[in-house]
Image (cartoon, helix red, strand yellow):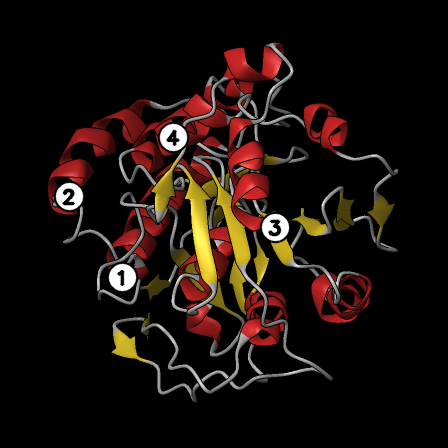
């Protein structure tokens, strides 16, 4: 698949919600109204979930236009921040001049589970040091009892396309495999495909993607690689699994030997695509400020978006921050017990 569909995930601290640490430069008050109008119109024209979320974007305009008119210089950032927050979308962000990405909205399930996973606790279940792929996007090893484990931390660049085959080769002869995509960043569709197709024995229809309201005609997934891993697989998820991690989860759920364990994912399915130009998520306002608004509506296999709804597990196992403090990973323990 030549076109790469980009999915981005929220991976920020609560300080970003409060707009702390924003780097700004000289005021550009003469551009404020132009920026406001451009940002509002961009959402109106491309954002796929206004109807699904029952957002009256015209009424949002009447609320925020007076604030934009009264904004002096960099005060427009707060207006844009609050207006974009109305979308309650963990993919939506803006750039300040000289600063980084600011995400107005943080998914509640991410806030709940962001400290309910610890890589240091996970390491207690191994008698060997975990192996790292070249980009450090994959941590993998064999748990006592011949259970394979792979933590996927990044779907960006071509990391998993290039590195997942080596990790899976190492884990090839295990009696079962745990794919851990808790605390998941986002990334590219091609990396998701590089993972899920290694567990397929036959073609699988893709979930529906709508680009700017039009259904994309995509060919089915096809099994890939020198071998298919056919032993039982458990996928671990939680509320911080987001975006590309959710897409990976939803596809894996369709496979007969896969069980998803943990808790419902964060709920972020608005993606974007490089081409055509109107489909790109990043959009420059007249002053040069940048906003990111998703243009693709990605669906679960039941036809619903996973935006807000998330991807539910097959077996719910609650893991809390208190469990982590006690040195336990109950979700991982459940997966190990299933596969031993």
> Looking at the image, do the residues carrying marks 3 and 4 touch, with CB atoms under 8 Å apart?
no
Q: Quote the CA–CA distance across marks 3 and 2.
A: 39 Å
The numbered mark, 3 or 2, whose residue comes first in the sequence reads 2
Residue 113 at x, y = what percent? 47, 26
SS under mark 1: helix
Q: Could you tell me which residue is drawn at 61 percent across and 50 percent down?
A: 178
Q: State the CA–CA distance, disc 1 to disc 2.
A: 14 Å
Q: CA distance from mark 3 to mark 1?
A: 41 Å
Q: Position of residue 297 (x, y in %)?
A: 32, 63
10 Å crowding of disc 1: few (<14), some (14-19), many (20+): few
Whichever of labels 1 and 4 marks the residue nearer the N terminus, that label is: 1
Q: Earlier in the sequence, mark 3 or mark 4?
A: 4
- Between disc 2 and disc 4, the foreground one is 4
Query: Taking 120 as reference, is 44 left or right?
Result: left
Closer to the eye: label 1 or 2: 2
Q: Give the Cα distance between marks 1 and 4.
A: 29 Å
User: Which residue is label 1 attached to?
Assistant: 45
Q: Residue beneath label 3, please?
A: 178
Mark 3–mark 2 CB contact (< 8 Å): no
**Residue that label 4 marks:** 109
- Mark 3 or 4: in front is 3
339 is higher (above) or lower (below) than 334: below
Mark 2 crowdedness (10 Å alpha carbons): few <14, some 14-19, many ≥20: few
Q: Does any portion of residue 283 appear in the rendered image?
A: no
| SS category of the residue bearing label 2 | loop
Q: Secondary structure at mark 3?
A: strand
Q: Which residue is mark 2?
A: 55
């Amino acid at each position: 698949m030549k076109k790469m569909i980009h999915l981005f995930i929220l991976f920020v601290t609560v300080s970003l919600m409060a707009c702390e640490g924003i780097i700004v430069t000289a005021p550009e008050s003469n551009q404020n109204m132009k920026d406001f109008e451009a940002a509002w119109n961009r959402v109106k024209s491309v954002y796929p979930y206004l109807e699904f979320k029952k957002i009256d974007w015209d009424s949002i305009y009447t609320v925020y236009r007076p604030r934009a008119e009264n904004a002096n210089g960099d005060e427009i950032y707060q207006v844009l921040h609050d207006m974009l927050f109305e979308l309650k979308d963990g993919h939506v962000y803006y750039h300040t001049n000289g600063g980084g990405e600011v995400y107005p909205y943080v998914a509640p399930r991410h806030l709940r589970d962001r400290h309910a996973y610890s890589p240091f606790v996970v390491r207690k279940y191994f008698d060997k040091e975990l192996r790292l792929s070249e980009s450090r996007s994959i941590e993998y090893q064999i748990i006592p009892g011949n259970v394979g484990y792979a933590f996927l931390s990044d779907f960006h660049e071509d990391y998993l396309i290039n590195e997942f085959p080596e990790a899976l080769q190492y884990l090839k002869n295990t009696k079962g495999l745990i794919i851990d995509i808790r605390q998941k960043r986002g990334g590219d569709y091609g990396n998701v495909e590089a993972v899920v197709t290694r567990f397929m024995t036959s073609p699988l229809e893709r979930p529906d993607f709508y680009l700017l309201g039009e259904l994309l005609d995509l060919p089915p997934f096809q099994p890939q690689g020198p071998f298919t891993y056919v032993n039982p697989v458990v996928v671990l998820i939680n509320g911080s699994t987001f975006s590309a991690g959710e897409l990976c989860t939803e596809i894996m759920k369709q496979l007969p030997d896969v069980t998803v364990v943990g808790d419902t994912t964060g709920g972020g399915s608005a993606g974007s695509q490089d081409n055509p130009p109107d489909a790109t998520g990043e959009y420059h306002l007249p002053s040069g400020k940048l906003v990111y608004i998703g243009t693709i509506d990605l669906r679960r296999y039941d036809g619903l978006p996973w935006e807000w709804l998330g991807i539910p597990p097959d077996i719910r196992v609650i893991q809390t921050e208190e469990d982590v403090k006690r040195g336990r990973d109950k979700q991982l323990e459940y997966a190990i017990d299933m596969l031993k």
